């Protein structure tokens, strides 16, 4: 039949989107691929073949393929069409060789899945029919620059020098369930090369996805509650350290990063910013995830509250020994903590056997204006320890609002802070005016073409 669209190109449209049975799907998909001119009423003639004739007998997809063969080969009637019987037998043999059986019960046990029913069987049946009919795929045009730009916004980045794409699958700070992991693995095998990779921001990339597979891949992931994205001039997926389980972690980093993901990655998903905006959560001042090199970084704090009356001025002070940065020492018979040197890691709390340092104030330090890349910037901490998660989250939101309101399109947040002055920015983030103007700031038509290129 030459070079045309393949029958499998239309299978999901009928089987999944329109909830047709296997026989109806194969019949309608081939009708569209081959241009047979059949109608919805004609489809009713094969509807009873689904589910192995309704009783698990001969596969409905094979029956649908046989109906298409009859449409294409039979003249006035089958008995008067030379070689038709033999061709039907040949098609059935090709089907059995490819799929391993012809009956519905055996094929269902082999290919059926709870999520997609017998989709794989119908796809393979479509391939068998196309090969039997001598069909080859029509060469597809390479995606245009506009196509590449459009799908990049959906989280698909073009692999250099190819017509394939890497699909960024969004996680919750790298956390996925076992079911989601299986779905991603299946998606990689069905629509890509079978390889997956982690990005630096803990999203998962499915490798080597052809352009024509992008739509089906997104639909397949959506069935498992997953989505692609994480690109463009907007809030990016949050990252955090493992402070939830780390011995030095001062707060539940996964819980906070999940709230940030929901509030600002999902909640601000359609908010256009001057450039990309990265947020990181560090469980303690060890800064393993480098929160001070993100646009906004949240770091756990445990501020020591010494009790001078309990200090005995020990010659070998347990608190001084425990401090990893030398901020604690006994001077003139009393424990002193250098406030300028102390980074509030909390390692000293409870070390004094006499109770001179058993109390602390927990909270969050927020860095703003960090940046890593061709140009780097060290984030600077706001001059305030935020006592609760809600207070810290309000400061993060104010930073996003300030950036959208006062940033110049294409400018990174570090450059916005440099231009406005750290003191002026800090004053706004510690005040409430930005939140009061939130609706006004979000409604503004700004940054319609942002500066992010990936």
Image (tube, rainbow, N blue to C red):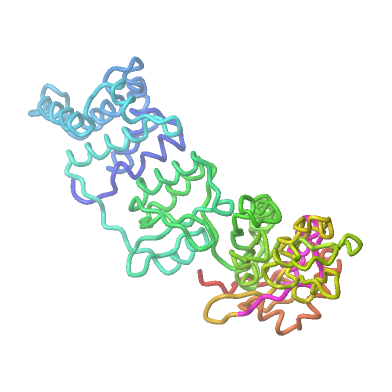
Above or below, 186 against 205 in this view is above
On the image, the x and y values in percent for residue 133 come to 18, 40
State the residue in front, 25 or 99. 99
Q: Quadrant of the N terminus?
A: top left
> At x 88% / y 61%, what residue is drawn?
307
Residue 145 falls in image quadrant:
bottom left
> At x 62% / y 65%, what residue is drawn?
234
Horizontal side of 303 relative to 257 (left or right) equals right
Instruction: Give the extent of the magenta segment.
Output: 377-403
State the residue in front, 279 or 252. 252
Horizontal side of 251 relative to 51 (left or right) equals right
Magenta stretch holds residue 394: yes
On the image, the x and y values in percent for residue 67 come to 25, 28
Residue extending furthest toward the right: 309
State the residue in front, 414 or 41. 414
Above or below, 234 against 50 in this view is below
On the image, the x and y values in percent for residue 283 come to 66, 59
On the image, the x and y values in percent for residue 219 come to 47, 45
> Taking the image as drawn, is residue 185 in sight?
yes
Horizontal side of 256 relative to 213 (left or right) equals right
Horizontal side of 161 relative to 153 (left or right) equals left
């Amino acid at each position: 039949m030459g070079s045309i669209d393949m029958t499998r190109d239309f299978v999901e449209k009928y089987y999944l989107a329109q909830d047709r049975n296997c026989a109806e799907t194969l019949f309608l998909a081939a009708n569209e691929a081959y241009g047979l001119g059949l109608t919805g009423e004609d489809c009713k003639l094969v509807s009873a073949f689904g589910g192995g004739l309704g009783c698990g007998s001969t596969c409905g997809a094979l029956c649908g393929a046989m109906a298409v063969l009859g449409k294409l080969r039979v003249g006035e009637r089958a008995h008067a069409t030379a070689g038709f019987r033999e061709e039907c037998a040949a098609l059935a043999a090709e089907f059995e060789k490819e799929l391993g059986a012809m009956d519905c019960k055996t094929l269902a046990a082999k290919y059926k899945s709870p999520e997609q029913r017998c989709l794989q069987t119908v796809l393979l049946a479509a391939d068998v029919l196309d090969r039997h009919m001598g069909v080859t795929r029509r060469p597809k045009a390479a995606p245009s620059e506009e196509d590449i730009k459009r799908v990049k916004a959906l989280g698909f980045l073009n692999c250099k020098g190819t017509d394939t794409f890497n699909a960024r699958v969004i996680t919750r700070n790298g956390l996925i369930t076992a079911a989601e992991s299986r779905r991603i693995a299946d998606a990689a095998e069905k629509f890509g090369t079978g390889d997956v990779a982690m990005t630096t921001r803990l999203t998962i990339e499915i490798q080597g996805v052809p352009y024509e597979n992008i739509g089906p891949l997104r639909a397949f992931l959506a069935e498992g509650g997953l989505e692609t994205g994480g690109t463009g001039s907007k809030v990016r997926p949050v990252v955090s350290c493992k402070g939830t389980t780390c011995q030095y972690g001062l707060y539940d980093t996964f819980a906070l990063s999940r709230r940030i993901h929901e509030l600002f990655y999902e909640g601000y998903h359609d908010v256009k910013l001057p450039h990309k905006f990265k947020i990181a959560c560090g469980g303690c001042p060890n800064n393993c995830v480098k929160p001070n090199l993100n646009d906004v970084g949240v770091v756990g704090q445990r501020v020591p509250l010494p009790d001078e009356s309990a200090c005995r001025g020990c010659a070998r002070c347990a608190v001084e020994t425990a401090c990893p940065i030398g901020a604690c020492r006994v001077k003139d018979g009393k424990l002193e903590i250098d406030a300028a040197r102390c980074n509030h890691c909390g390692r000293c709390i409870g070390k004094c056997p006499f109770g001179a340092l058993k109390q602390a104030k927990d909270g969050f330090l927020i860095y703003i204006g960090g940046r890593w890349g061709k140009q780097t910037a060290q984030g600077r901490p706001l001059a305030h320890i935020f006592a609760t998660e809600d207070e810290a989250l309000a400061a993060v939101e104010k930073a996003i609002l300030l950036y959208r309101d006062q940033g110049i399109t294409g400018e990174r947040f570090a450059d916005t802070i440099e231009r406005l002055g750290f003191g002026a920015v800090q004053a706004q983030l510690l005040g409430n005016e930005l939140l009061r103007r939130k609706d006004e700031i979000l409604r503004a038509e700004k940054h319609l073409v942002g500066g992010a290129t990936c």
